[in-house]
Image (cartoon, rainbow, N blue to C red):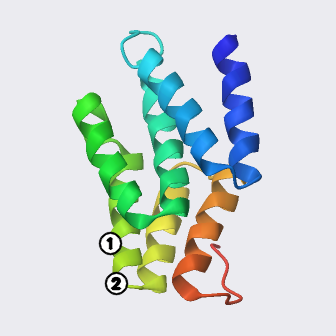
Amino acid sequence: SANKCLLKVAGYAAQLEQYQKAVEIFEQVGTSTMDNPLLKHSAKDYFFKAALCHFLVDELNAKLALEKYEEMFPAFTDSRECKLLKKLLEAHEEQNCEAYTEAVKEFDSISRLDQWLTTMLLRIKKSIQGESEGDLK
């Protein structure tokens, strides 16, 4: 239950654009859950959220974080979350808003994005398109 509280704090920190604090908490919880057979499935979600927060700070940070998470937790590499992050990074590098939106839509069609993820993904998208009136859906 301590982890649940920490995750709430991380979620709020990210919404308040305190990304570094959010990253630290998501990584801490992800690392503590990845070795637990019952909780390791959740670890990919925490690393995914941490990587999104990194992305909002700096694209290079997100790339390095992604490599680190894949090394720490090999199961993350095959996850849909990891594949989405790679597509988003590629689209961001190419400043390709359509590819970014397409990758998000494809992910959302399998598992619905919650409000928090939608907010973070829109913030990243805005950094690609400058302040445009685009939307994820």
Residue placed at 43% from the left, 68% from the top?
103
Query: Above or below — where is 107 with respect to 43?
Result: below
Name which residue type carries label 1.
Glu
Q: Position of residue 99 (x, y in %)?
A: 41, 79
Q: Which labelled disc corresponds to residue 90?
A: 1
Q: Can you tell which mark lies on residue 68? A: none
Calculate the distance from the C-alpha at mark 2 to the C-alpha at mark 1: 6 Å
Residue at image position (70%, 40%) is 11
> Three-letter amino acid code at disc 2?
Glu
Q: Secondary structure at mark 2?
A: loop
| Quarter placement of the N terminus | top right
Identify residue for label 2. 94
Q: Residue at x 52, y 67 (%)?
A: 105
Q: Where is residue 69 drawn, in percent x and y?
A: 32, 38
User: Would you place residue 36 above or below residue 66 in this image?
Assistant: above
Residue found 65% across the figure and 73% down from its top: 137
Horizontal relation, residue 9 to residue 117: left or right: right
Q: Secondary structure at mark 1?
A: helix
Answer above or below: position of 85 versus 124: above
Please state if 11 lies on the left or on the right of 43 as rendered. right
In this rendered view, identify the residue nearer to me: 74 or 99: 74
